[in-house]
Image (cartoon, grey):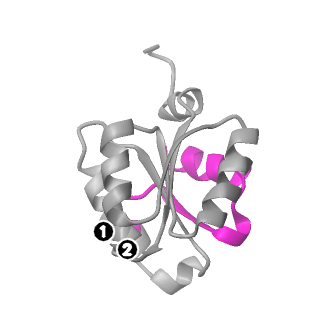
Amino acid sequence: MCAMCSDTTIFLMERTMLIVDDHAGYRRQARTLFTSGGYDVIGEAADVASGVRAAAELHPAVVLLDVQLPDGDGFEAAGKMLAADEPPAVVLISSRDAADYGSRIGASGARGFISKADLSVGALEAVLGAAT
């Protein structure tokens, strides 16, 4: 790794992504969006258990993680993913506003939050860049 590279540069170079959302149509839409934006979507999961397992097995650079999942929530999943030796950058997403979750977003250890309505490659990269 170069001594002058920032964490942001590393994440932009390692553009692998895992999408965890319980709606298959939304995962498909996000996959299309981020693939066209230069990301390699290496996996998808529909719940906390499979998302945590996929993150451990695939080692993505970024996990796009829905807050509301059928077997738990994204805050729980983020904690498990971030406990890894080399954790991914976790970005929480939801159809609800960030204000609905209060301080839970910051306390989760996630890099940030993007509402599903505002999700874009630029929004993701802004969150990843702002967190470093």
Seen as rendered, the residue at the extreme right is: 36
- Image x and y of residue 84, in percent: 25, 44
Q: Which residue has dot 1 on it? A: 76
Secondary structure beneath dot 2 equals strand
- Image x and y of residue 127, in percent: 58, 53
Residue found 51% across the figure and 22% down from its top: 5
Seen as rendered, the residue at the extreme bottom is: 100
Secondary structure beneath dot 1 equals helix
Q: Dividing the picture into quarters, in which one does residue 57 lie? A: top left
Q: Dividing the picture into quarters, in which one does residue 35 lie? A: top right
**Range shown magenta:** 106-132
- Image x and y of residue 115, in percent: 63, 70
| 127 part of magenta stretch | yes
Residue found 57% across the figure and 69% down from its top: 23
- Image x and y of residue 111, in percent: 46, 54
* 48 relative position to 31: left or right: left
* Cβ–Cβ under 8 Å for marks 2 and 1: yes
Q: Amino acid at mark 2?
A: Asp
Whether residue 86 is visible: yes
Q: Which residue has dot 2 on it? A: 73
Residue found 47% across the figure and 33% down from its top: 7
In this rendering, is residue 55 above or below 52? above
Circle 2 packing at 10 Å, graded few (<14), some (14-19), many (20+), is some
Residue found 39% across the figure and 37% down from its top: 58
In this rendering, is residue 50 above or below 6? below
Distance from label 2 to label 1 (Cα)?
5 Å
Quadrant that contains the N terminus: top left
Which label sits on residue 5? none
Q: Amino acid at mark 1?
A: Glu
| 7 part of magenta stretch | no
